[in-house]
Image: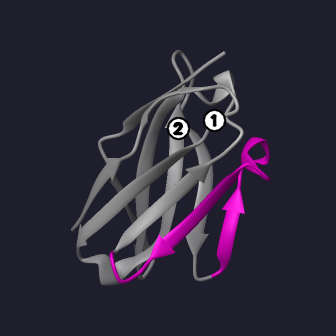
Amino acid sequence: QVQLVESGGGLVQAGGSLRLSCAASGSVFSINSMNWYRQAPGKQREWVATVSSGGTNYVDSAKGRFNISIDNAKNTVYLQMNSLKPEDTAVYYCHAGVTIGLVVFSYWGQGTQDTVSS
């Protein structure tokens, strides 16, 4: 089992920055990837960024503006979001992927609301 707790959301003006944190606990040794997703009002949940042993990857709309990083000593993953736009407004969710054999397990945080005003 993996537990995830997010923090760092809030209200910011367009062009501003926010940094989200996601602290993992439990069986963190089993985590293969850490990810951020977001869900805007009335829309489906969307993948935003991934960090794993293979490196980092981003949705096109986040490239050049967002940076995902991990502090292994603190079991914490961060999402630094710069040059924020109103369309970045969403609930942001931390996700941990655990692969054991052929089975993939997903763990989610509770979500944190980010609002970007124009």
**Disc number lying in front (2 or 1):** 1
Q: Within the magenta stretch, is there residue 66?
A: yes
- Position of residue 68 measured from the top left corner of the image (x, y, whole percent): 59, 62
Which residue in the protein does label 1 denote?
A: 16
In the rendered view, tell whether residue 71 sits above or below residue 58. Answer: below
Read off the magenta span.
Answer: 54-74
In which image quadrant can residue 58 be found? bottom right
- Position of residue 35 measured from the top left corner of the image (x, y, whole percent): 51, 58
| Near-viewer residue (100 or 71) | 71
Sequence-wise, the earlier of marks 2 and 1 is 1
The structure's colour scheme is: one colour
Q: Within the magenta stretch, is there residue 7?
A: no
Residue at 55% across, 28% down: 44
- What's the CA distance linking mark 2 and mark 1? 18 Å
Kind of residue sitting beneath label 2: Arg
Classed neighbour count for the residue bearing mark 2: other residues with Cα under 10 Å, few (<14), some (14–19), many (≥20): many
- Position of residue 109 measured from the top left corner of the image (x, y, whole percent): 32, 49
Residue at 72% across, 39% down: 83
Q: Residue 38, labelled with which disc?
A: 2
| Near-viewer residue (65 or 38) | 65
Q: Residue 76, labelled with which disc?
A: none
Residue at 63% across, 35% down: 16
